Amino acid sequence: MKTLYQKIENGERINTSEALLLAHQGDFHELGRLAREKSIQKNGKKIAFLIDRNINYTNVCAARCSFCAFYRPHKHKESYDLSFEAIDQKIEETLKLGGTRILMQGGLHPQHNLDYYIALISHIKNKFSTLHIHAFSPPEIHHVSQKSGVSYEEALSSLKKAGLGSMPGGGAEILVDHIRDQIVIGKCNSRQWLEIMETSHRVGIRSTATMMMGHVESWEDRIEHLERLRSIQDKTHGFLSFIPWTFQPENTALHPRIKRNHQVNLANTFEYLKMLALSRIYLDNFDHLQVSLLTQGVKVAQIGLHFGADDLGSFLIEENVVRLAGRSQEISLEKETMAKIILESGYTPFERDTFYNTLLN
């Protein structure tokens, strides 16, 4: 193991077998140390944060994900589809609270096609010209491309022209199809998710990447997920950051399986921090690693900054998907609070934009 640790310290790329060895046999504190050193080498002792709002424009979804407590079928009594005016109001509130962008994702609405997405982006950009729009994860792009009969490239190019600034990495879950097949019905597969991301980068839309861990996957599946992301990044250099987060079980269809202890292993704090460290070590071509403040809470997020993360992310002025799965963190949304969390961890905070440029206030 010492030889492998030295290889990492020398800046050499590790392979999947070595990553798996670290996952199963690596010393927890040594992995944290190595990841922290890698992070400091890339970004110094500065930790980023941002203020934005998550606007879930609809909860109507044709997919059936057993891990999701947010979606509702079309015409369900609890379903909704926000009007443009309602979205405008949320944006105005965001700007008053100091937000600099919106993160916009929704369900796969059976009546939404590419024209709707273009109209929505164009409307927002015409009314709020300086606002950055970080929107539409790969499953949404796949959905509207199919409904409108256009290629991924045509859909993404049209959205960029309308004003789409960047794309979130949602819908990845685990990029291994034998795992996706157990928890997802009616959503793009791993090959399609990766193809959409590669196409997005090619047309000039940069993105984040995510992983949802702690359900039916193994460490082997998690490492395969990282390898697929690293391979795309070698080609495109279009991923801005990687954001692993833990499955939140309450009110989901997977929850009964957990109670029966049937093939579901929730990730504890120890496992989450190990995943952060391995991500920083393995994803050597990613500049940034974001801790999941929303699912882990402040104290674990602060520890995560010592396990390779250099980005506290945003607590989000509005968040619905994780909240409905039973996770609700109480925290002030003021910039001073975000900065304090970072300062208490021994790092220097800075407010960033989507592309990690420092925002001057």
Image (spheres, rainbow, N blue to C red):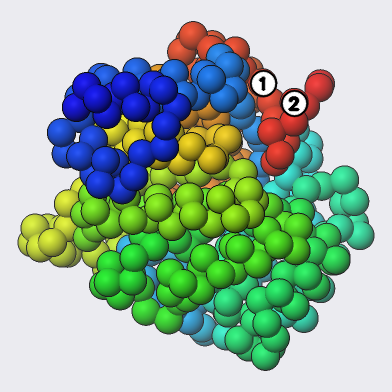
Residue at the image position 30 percent from the left and 60 percent from the top: 251
Instruction: Determine whether label 2 and label 1 are within 8 Å by CB.
Output: yes
Specify whether residue 4 is in view: yes
Left or right, 194 with respect to 89, comes to left
- In the picture shown, does residue 201 fall above or below 144? above
In this view, 225 is above or below 41: below
Q: Residue at x 58, y 16 (%)?
A: 44
Q: Amino acid at mark 1?
A: Phe
Task: Answer above or below: position of 23 versus 237.
Answer: above
| Secondary structure beneath label 1 | strand
Mark number displayed over residue 358: 2
Give residue 344's position: percent from left, percent from top.
Answer: 48, 10
Callout 2, which amino acid? Answer: Thr
Quadrant where the N terminus lies? top left
Q: Is residue 21 left or right of residue 141?
A: left
Observer-nearest residue: 126 or 333? 126
Of residues 258 and 284, the one nearer the viewer is 284
Residue 65 lies in what quarter of the image? bottom left
Residue 58 in view (yes/no): no
Left or right of 328, for residue 91:
right
Residue 335 is labelled as none
Image location (x, y in percent) of residue 93: 74, 44
Question: Residue under circle 1?
Answer: 350
Closer to the camera, 299 or 285?
285
- Which quarter of the image is occupied by the C terminus? top right
Label 1: how many Cα within 10 Å (few below 14, some 14–19, many 20+): many
Residue pictured at 73% horizontal, 45% vertical: 101
Residue 143: percent from the left, percent from the top? 58, 79
